């Protein structure tokens, strides 16, 4: 995966309002992990909300990609997570050493898993 996120905070419904994330590029370089907060207007902090927060936080790396096109995984070998998966239910993303990873599709390619 490309971005990594971790859990923190305590939002209602999902049990968390923030997580740790990192963005990994097609060449394997990974950004420094950073805390992502649940975007305003999102009723729960799920993978869909992580994608929206990542799009904002990693704007330069993810320029040209819609949040919906991003793939979020728990660890490098993890499977793509469903958009409705609650962040609070994940093992990854709880700290900066084990962030969720977020990937974008290669330019000109249709998004499939694996992303690259």
Image (cartoon, rainbow, N blue to C red):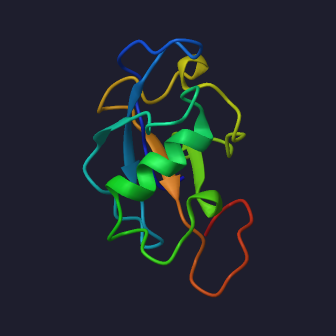
Q: Residue at x 64, y 58 (%)?
A: 68
Quarter the C terminus occupies: bottom right
Above or below 44: residue 27? below
Residue 23 horizontal side relative to residue 33, left or right: right
- Identify the residue at image location x=33%, y=53%: 57
Q: Nearer the viewer, residue 35 or 73?
A: 35
Q: Residue furthest front?
A: 41
Q: Quadrant of residue 56?
A: bottom left
Q: Residue at x 55, y 34 (%)?
A: 42
Q: How many marks?
A: 0
In this picture, is 57 found above or below 74? Answer: below
| Image location of residue 87, percent across then percent down | 55, 26
Q: Residue 30: percent from the left, percent from the top?
A: 34, 58
Please name whichever residue, 32 or 52, is drawn nearer the observer in this view of the structure: 52
| 62 vs 54: above or below | below
Q: Percent x, y for residue 47? A: 60, 38
Residue lying furthest bottom: 108
Q: Is residue 63 above or below residue 84?
A: below
Q: Nearer the viewer, residue 36 or 101?
A: 36
- Residue 31 lies, in percent from the top left, at 29, 56
Question: At 43% across and 43% down in the image, what residue appears?
Answer: 4
């Amino acid at each position: 995966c490309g971005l990594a996120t971790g859990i923190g905070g305590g939002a209602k419904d999902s049990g968390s309002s923030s997580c740790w994330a990192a963005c990994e590029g097609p060449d394997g370089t990974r950004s420094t992990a950073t805390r992502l907060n649940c975007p305003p207007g999102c009723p729960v902090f799920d993978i869909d909300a992580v994608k929206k927060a990542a799009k904002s936080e990693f704007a330069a790396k993810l320029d040209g990609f819609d949040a919906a096109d991003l793939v979020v995984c728990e660890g490098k070998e993890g499977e793509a997570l469903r958009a409705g998966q609650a962040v609070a239910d994940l093992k990854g993303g709880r700290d900066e050493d084990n962030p969720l990873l977020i990937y974008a599709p290669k330019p000109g390619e249709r998004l499939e898993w694996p992303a690259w």
